[in-house]
Image (tube, rainbow, N blue to C red):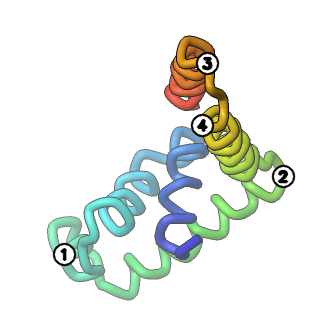
Amino acid sequence: MAKDLHFVLLLDCYGDLLTEHQRSIMEQYYCEDLSLAEIGSPLGITRQAVRSLIKRTEDILLNYEEKLGFAQRLRSMRECFESILSAADGISDEALRSGIRKDVEKGLALL
C-alpha cells in the first residue's frame, strides 16, 4: 500500500484520537494534497513546523496501529469480503449468488 494511502487509512481509524490541530494538518496534507507552505501560511507557521508536526503525528498514528491493529483488521476483512465475492461468482444459483453479494455489500458498508 502506498505510504499516503496507509496514512489516510490510519487517519480514518484513529483521527478522532488526535487533537483537532493534528487532525486538520494531516487531513490537509494527506487528503487535500496541500503543500507544506499552503498548510502553514494561513496558520502563520513555517513549512518546517508543519513538516515536524506531520512527522510527530505520523509516529502517533503508527503507534496506535501497532498497539490496536484496527487498520490491519480492516484490510483483512476487506480481503475476506473480496474473496467471498469472487467465490460467489462461481455459484450457478442466481438467487443465492445475489443474496451473497448483497450481504457482502452490507458488510463492506459497515467497514
Of badges 1 and 4, the one in the foreground is: 4
Query: Which residue is denoted by mark 1 in the rendering?
Result: 38
Please tell me whether mark 4 or mark 2 is closer to you in this view. Answer: 4
- Marks 4 and 2, how far apart at CA: 37 Å
Q: Are marks 3 and 2 in contact (CB under 8 Å)?
A: no
| Numbered tag placed on residue 105 in the rendering | none
Relative to residue 25, is residue 88 depicted above or below? above
Left or right: 27 as drawn, with respect to 42:
right
- Looking at the image, tell me whether mark 1 or mark 3 is earlier in sequence order: 1
Q: Which residue is mark 4?
A: 89
User: What element does badge 2 sit on?
Assistant: helix
Q: CA distance from mark 3 to mark 2?
A: 43 Å
Q: Residues within 10 Å of mark 1 (few under 14, many from 20)?
A: some
**In the current view of this chain or complex, which residue is farthest to the bottom?**
48
Residue under label 3: 93
The residue drawn where x is 69% and y is 44% is: 83
**Crowding at mark 2 (Cα within 10 Å: few <14, some 14-19, many 20+):** few
Residue with the mark numbered 2: 67
Residue 70 appears in view:
no
